[in-house]
Image: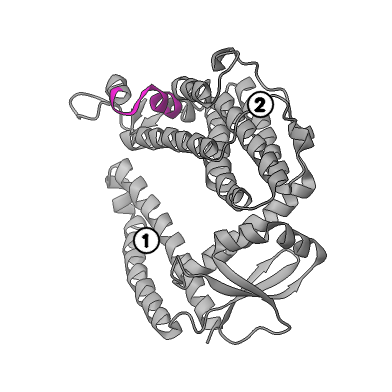
């Protein structure tokens, strides 16, 4: 275990991280999950307080997910059969849980605890908290009692599976939440390990929700690139769409409109000047933004930002291309410069893509 720059800890350097201090400040679960997530076979653990703090925040995210489920009356149903779910959204989420469990089990059997931790984190933080919780809101706000009932039962089941998955690495918060959610016959530590798997993966539901996620992410990205106000609801145009796309839109219209901040959808034969195109599998959408943003001002703003960034990139490249710097500078400084270069290059690519979008608009 070394410090965040890979330097051996010593009192002389003042870079010692005491795990007991970390436990006092961030909790035992955050420290345990941090160590698990970094425990690659034969690897060096580069420990930092920021990383431990991040996993403490992950625990908070889990707690908030449980609170959301309780607020929407998602209580565990002993008769719930995940294989019997009917809504594409719920079938997709159940399939994601099954895939996460398979990845987790395989990682533990190979003693790759970091891969197991990654599988749990990606599923709980990325799929559950960042996707599914948001995706269920239109259903909970609807008048469809059957859909609400199924989604409540699915949400409760998913939350329970998340707690089971995280328990070996985060035993305290998961045990606490297990008891808070409902009265149980067993403590979580005594719960049987799940045995479901690929049979719960519905390929049609997976394909449909992947399409929805791709569309929402593309719309959000396009809005952000050309600086559309985050809260503004905007119209969208549909130029072409195949049957699968139409079905996916019909099944998830409320969800897409809510998450992408879309006000209306109109079908058109030709796209107007000043529309940003959004391509998805089987279809083309567009955002008519010419009257919503100042295209000329946005072009100027992006051009200036890109120019400033290119100067910074030139300095970084010059430094890293200098053999004297690479050979004489501390390894940590060289590594930091390379990381900084990669980050700024990615940022420049995004800005150039945004400028290209604006160029399409005239």
Q: Position of residue 114 (x, y in %)?
A: 52, 29
Q: Main secondary structure of the magenta part?
A: helix
Q: Position of residue 305 (x, y in %)?
A: 36, 72
Task: Name, please, the residue furthest toward the left.
Answer: 12
Q: Position of residue 75 (x, y in %)?
A: 60, 31
**Residue 47 falls in which quadrant of the image?**
top left
**Where does the N terminus fall, quadrant-wise?**
top left
Looking at marks 2 and 1 on the same chain, the residue that comes earlier in the sequence is marked by: 2
Q: Which residues are magenta?
A: 24-34
**Residue 31 falls in which quadrant of the image?**
top left
Q: Is residue 191 above or below residue 261?
A: above
Q: In this rendering, would 333 be left or right of 229?
A: left
Whether residue 161 is visible here, answered yes or no, is yes
The residue at 33%/62% (across/down) is: 318
**Residue 93 falls in which quadrant of the image?**
top right
The residue at 45%/83% (across/down) is: 295
Q: In this rendering, would 223 be left or right of 326?
A: right
How far is mark 2 from mark 1, CA to CA? 41 Å
Which residue corresponds to mark 1?
317
Q: Which mark is residue 106?
A: 2
Dot 1 falls on a residue whose secondary structure is helix
Q: Is residue 358 magenta?
A: no
Q: Position of residue 102 (x, y in %)?
A: 68, 30
């Amino acid at each position: 275990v070394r410090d965040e720059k890979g330097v051996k800890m010593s009192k002389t350097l003042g870079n010692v991280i005491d795990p007991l201090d970390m436990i006092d400040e961030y909790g035992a679960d955050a420290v345990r999950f941090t160590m698990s997530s970094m425990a690659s076979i034969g690897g060096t653990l580069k420990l930092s307080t920021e990383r431990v703090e991040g996993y403490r925040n992950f625990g908070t995210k889990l707690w908030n997910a449980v609170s959301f489920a309780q607020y929407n009356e998602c209580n565990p149903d002993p008769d719930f059969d995940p294989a019997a779910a009917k809504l594409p959204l719920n079938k997709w989420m159940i399939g994601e849980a099954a895939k996460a469990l398979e990845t987790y089990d395989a990682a533990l059997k190979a003693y790759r605890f970091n891969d197991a931790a990654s599988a749990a984190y990606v599923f709980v933080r990325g799929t559950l908290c960042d996707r599914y919780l948001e995706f269920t809101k239109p259903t909970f706000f609807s008048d469809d009692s059957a859909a609400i009932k199924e989604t409540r039962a699915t949400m409760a089941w998913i939350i329970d599976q998340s707690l089971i998955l995280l328990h070996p690495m985060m035993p305290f918060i998961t045990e606490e939440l297990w008891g808070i959610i409902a009265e149980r016959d067993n403590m979580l530590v005594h719960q049987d390990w799940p045995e479901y798997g690929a049979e719960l993966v519905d390929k049609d539901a997976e394909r449909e929700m992947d399409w929805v996620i791709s569309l929402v992410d593309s719309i959000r990205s396009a809005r952000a690139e050309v600086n559309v106000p985050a809260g503004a609801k905007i119209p969208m145009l549909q130029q072409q769409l195949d049957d699968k796309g139409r079905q996916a839109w019909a099944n998830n219209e409320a969800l897409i409109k809510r998450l992408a901040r879309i006000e209306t959808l109109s079908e058109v034969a030709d796209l107007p000047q000043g529309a940003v195109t959004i391509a998805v599998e089987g279809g083309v959408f567009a955002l008519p933004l010419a009257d919503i943003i100042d295209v000329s001002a946005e072009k100027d703003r992006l051009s200036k930002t890109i120019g400033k960034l290119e100067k910074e990139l030139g300095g970084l490249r010059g430094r890293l291309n200098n053999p004297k710097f690479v050979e004489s500078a501390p390894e940590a400084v060289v590594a930091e410069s390379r990381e900084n270069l990669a980050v700024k290059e990615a940022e420049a690519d995004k800005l150039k893509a945004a400028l290209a979008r604006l160029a399409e608009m005239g």
